[in-house]
Image (cartoon, grey):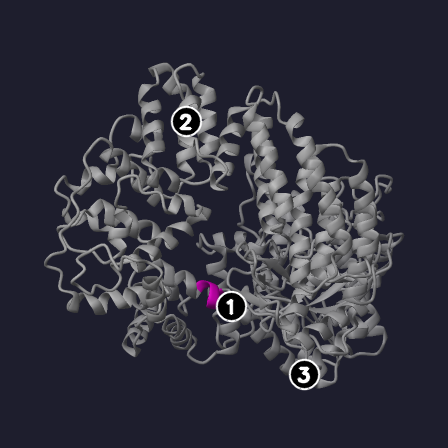
Amino acid sequence: MSRVEVYGIRHHGPGSARALRTALEDFKPDAVLIEGPPEADPIVELAADDGMVPPVALLAYSPGQAAPDGTGRSAAFWPFAEFSPEWQAIRYALGAGASVRFCDLPAANQLVPPTSDAPDTPSAPDVSDAPGAPEAPDASDIPSAPEAPGAPDAPSAPSAPDAADAADAAEDTPSPTSDAPDAVEGTPGPTPGDREGAEESIRQDPLGWLARAAGYDDTERWWDDVVEHRTGGPSPFPAIAEAMTELRAQLRLEEDGAPSGEALREEQREAHMRRTLRRALKDGYERVAVVVGAWHVPALLAKTPAAHDDRTLRGLPKTKVAMTWVPWTHGRLAGRSGYGAGVRSPGWYHHLFTAPDRPIERWLTDAARVLREEDLHVSSAHVIEAVRLAETLAALRGRPLAGLDEVTEATRAVLCEGADLPVELIRKRMAVGERLGAVPERTPMVPLQRDLQAEQRRLRLKPSALEKEQDLDLRKPTDLERSHLLHRLRLLDVDWGVPAETGRSKGTFRETWDLLWRPEFDVELIEASAWGTTVRGAATARAEALAAEAESLADLTSAAERCLLADLGGALPAVMGALADRAAVDTDVGHLMSALPALVRALRYGDVRGTSTGPLRTVVDGLVVRVCVGLPPAVSGLDDDAARDVLTRVDAVHGALSLLADEGHIERWRRTLEGLIARPDGLHGLLEGRLTRLLMDAGRLDDVPARMARAVSTGTAPDRAAAWVEGFLSGGGLMLMHDEALLRLVDAWISGLPAGSFTDVLPLLRRTFGAYAAAERRAIGERVRRLGTAPAPRPSTENLDTTRAAPATTTALQILGWTPHDLKQEAADHDEPGRGDADHDEPGRGDAGRGETKRAMAGRDGIGDDEAGRDRTGHDEARQAEAGHDEAGHDEAGRGEANGDRGGRDWTARGETGRDGSGRGEAQGGGTGRDEEVGLGEGDGRG
């Protein structure tokens, strides 16, 4: 006589997996039916391959079928981890020579999008919950199932000793509704006020109901205590099956009328499970094990006629699907990823399954190793005390084994000494335990996937589930090809690599990428295979399509830049032809300005990469001329929003031309800007101020103080004056720190504003100064505080001990990059060897030292040599600070400015010592009254 055992499991649980493996070894089935898509039957044998390393997932996708959510993707995943009961069932069956079949509703039915004309009958499927998102391996498990989104997986269900007989007699037995067991005697039913939503809550969270009945307020804690943390003892499956039966009986009492869409989909799935079981028995298998979510066990044990199931499944729409295995990650098994059957801590569950012997000791030892790798001191004594604390907490809380909560508390208190940051590190490295699985070479793949894998091996770019930074030197052939590959994948919307914000420095041969492989990239590669069979070919076709579909000039310039970065010479002619045609007829200056920066980047870095850019240079030359001609009429009569938009484009064009380094284009651009500020009528104050600043930085204006004086004079409207100041100062605050004349003008203007006008312009000023770094704001505040005071006397050098000072000075100059040869050369270029006493040989205090100071100032934030050499007090305090004057009697403010802006140190850091006679507290505050309101009063940026 045939015998059937039905095991209800939680989809990802180490205790369930261990108990199931033991139960299968005892039962020794000759066929194992597993909840999953039947289309995977032909490829299930790949799970026995040595190259199949979990976590992995079954991927079902429908080529060319749009997803219900409108994403254009119709696919679903069924993931498996090492600690997944279904995975252990598959591995056991393949190892024991038993037949393996999947018994859930076919993916061909689940991937059908909903239709508005679907008949409203029990045979018409409700596919609104069909899986369509990559994170929905069990998205077909609608909320009626315990593994549904938003609810923890249902626990395991019992074996059924007589289930075979029940299956044999199913065709002649009444429907499950007529044989539904009554509610447990003595179990109170819901009150009228509780009936509303009772069905929904049971379907959504069956384990929550059981946990509350057991006196737990945490579902996960209850499930861990009764199943996952169990070692040995009787099988948990019969007890859990009984609990599920009672819950479904209670739910059946609450159902009223026709089943909802969720209940209908559940009924269809369970009907197909029963049909598969009947077929297995009909095929002659005598010992059949069925592994399904615990919620489904009562339905499989019920004596349901085959005719009833046939009516339920008749006429279900279907679509063409393909099935394969793909790598998965532990992060996507976590519930926080949106996976409905997810668990809190996949890494913890993996540890419990793979280290059943002394799991707490091993876990805390691994945690100590992680902390030591980060140079944190953790000894063996720490680990011993942490183990004792975790076990004590578990005993106090009545738990059979310390759980992740107890272990984490012990880690925080003992290993991390109360610090939260190391605990978070352990959570990411261990509790989630991010890892990426692998599939064997013979796994079914589209040609594009195989080509990408070959490229990854050739270029030694291994996918990883952990984000890592990859630096590429484009002068090296391998790194250049890696860059090409990553850019081609981005054209195919496979963002395996994302350029870092600081990834490409101007004028360098370097790129920096952030690499992170996600499972859904396999779906995107399958979709992108419509463009070609190789990464290069698919990216070329995709670039040509983007150029043909481009709606604006900016879209075309972006496509051209991406072609050059990806080295797609085959697509470049079509893209450049479309770009030239569109640029010739586009008369909008804003469009031309928006397109220019991308073209210049492509031109510049195309040269770096050795890519031919001849046609692109022609387009750039024409755009520069047209922008310069069309800019003047385009900037007149603008309101505030339009002016700010034009300002952004002007800055972008200015930076692009600087990158291009074409003197003819730069000169034409500067003459255009000079013409605009020569006729300021109709020019917005924001633009006038910014253009003035750009020309001043270029050394084209020598009357900037006079221009600022006119801009902020009494006769100018306060809002226009504020806009002018905002535009002028938007490039950074170093100018105010080192040009006292301009600082006095701004200070006098702010101080002289009437109360009402000051309130009106205050938001603009705060926005301007708020964009500065905290160190810049503090330095400006200190300079304002000192306005009107006599400069501090220069320190005397009569008693300077050059012998003692020489080693320190030499070291400082070496840190700055100077060599003895540089010092000798600099000294030879000047008639005067130094500013100090000629009788003393003082390294670093002569013109060599001053030259270095000028060079350092000239490199700050793009300020030109004219600013670096500007010294309105006669002796630049910053030069004294850098030349080695670092004694208590020297001017702290001067030394502070030199150090604060050069080396990145906070120049007020030494101010707390109180060496400034006036007290550093006031210096840090940077003044009172309106200076504080503008944003200069608080050194820490709170202004």
Q: Quadrant of the N terminus?
A: bottom right
Q: Quadrant of the C terminus?
A: top left
Q: Mark 2 or mark 1, which has the lower sequence index?
A: 1
The answer to which quarter of the image holds residue 397 is bottom left
Foreground residue, 596 or 704?
704
Element type at marker 2?
Answer: helix
Marks 2/1: CA–CA distance: 64 Å
| Residue 428 forms part of the magenta stretch | yes
Q: Residue furthest right?
A: 315
Q: Residue at x 42, y 63 (%)?
A: 425
> Label 2 crowding class (10 Å Cα cut-off): few <14, some 14-19, many 20+?
few
Q: Mark 3 or mark 1, which has the lower sequence index?
A: 3
The residue where tag 1 is placed is 433
Q: Confirm or deny contact between disc 3 and disc 2 (CB under 8 A).
A: no
Q: Is residue 637 in view from this perspective?
A: yes
> Label 1 crowding class (10 Å Cα cut-off): few <14, some 14-19, many 20+?
many
Residue 50's mark?
A: 3
The residue where tag 2 is placed is 706
Inspect the image, locate mark 1, and give the three-letter code of the amino acid beneath it: Gly
Marks 3/2: CA–CA distance: 79 Å
Marks 3/1: CA–CA distance: 22 Å
Residue 868's mark?
A: none
The x, y position of residue 432, in whole percent, is 51, 64
The x, y position of residue 136, in whole percent, is 68, 56
Inspect the image, locate mark 2, and give the three-letter code of the amino acid beneath it: Ala
Residues rendered magenta in the picture? 427-431
| Residue 736 forms part of the magenta stretch | no
